[in-house]
Image: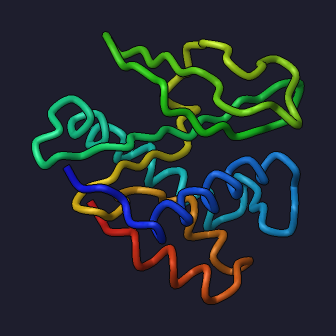
Amino acid sequence: MNQPSPSALALIGVLLTLLTACSKRDKGYVEDNDPEMAAAIAKAQETLPQFWQVFDKRERGESNFVLVVRITDKGRIEHFHTTDFEHRDGKTMVTISNKPNIVASVKLGDRIEIPAADITDWSYMRDGKYVGMATIKPRFKHMPTAQVEGFKQVMTDP
């Protein structure tokens, strides 16, 4: 099994920071209705069946599976990174893996069913590279060039 390099682990940390920073609406946050972000979310949702196929089979040693889910509460939106999830009979159960900053309807550790329409991104690792992460690309315009290049080095297309 491939082990992530130290630079890949650092980028994972940056990705998690960006995902949780979404909720703080910092300068790197891109709204869901931004045209680039909306297209990225649509791409992630369109390719979700491919993600589930790889998740179920893991024919090439894929690991580190991640879902990003959107929780809406009284008009407020927050995205959560989840790694503890299951998909059966068309239903997806996830565990909220970070503390909410915007929404109040969930808390850290809650296990909830999430509709497919609220899965806004996905990723996994294959051959030392990350597959997926469609919604990181619209954020590139808000990142330092070195950070963008670091992401590009550890990302690949499905």
Residue furthest bottom as drawn = 145
Quarter of the image that includes the C terminus: bottom left
Q: Residue at image x 50%, y 73%? A: 151
Figure check: 127 above or below 105: below
Left or right of 75 in this view: 115: left
List x then y, in percent, for residue 138: 62, 69
Picture colour scheme? rainbow
Occupied quadrant, residue 90: top left
Asked whether 42 or 119 is in front, the reply is: 119
Which of these two is toward me, 7 or 46? 7
Residue shown at 38%/66% (left/top)?
Answer: 5
Q: Is residue 104 left or right of residue 18?
A: right
**Residue 94's spot in the image, x, y percent?**
53, 21
**Residue 143 in the image, given as x and y percentages of width and height:** 70, 78
Residue positioned most to the left: 59
**How many marks can you see?**
0
Q: Position of residue 11 (x, y in %)?
A: 54, 65
Query: Which residue is drawn at the image coordinates 77% and 52% (left, top)?
Result: 22
Q: Nearer the viewer, residue 118 or 136?
A: 136
Please, is residue 111 above or below residue 43 in the view? Answer: above
Residue 52 occupies which quadrant of the picture?
Answer: top left
The vertical placement of 56 against 137, above or below, is above
Which residue corresponds to the image point at 56% horizontal and 40% vertical from the top-left? 68
66 displayed left or right of 34: left
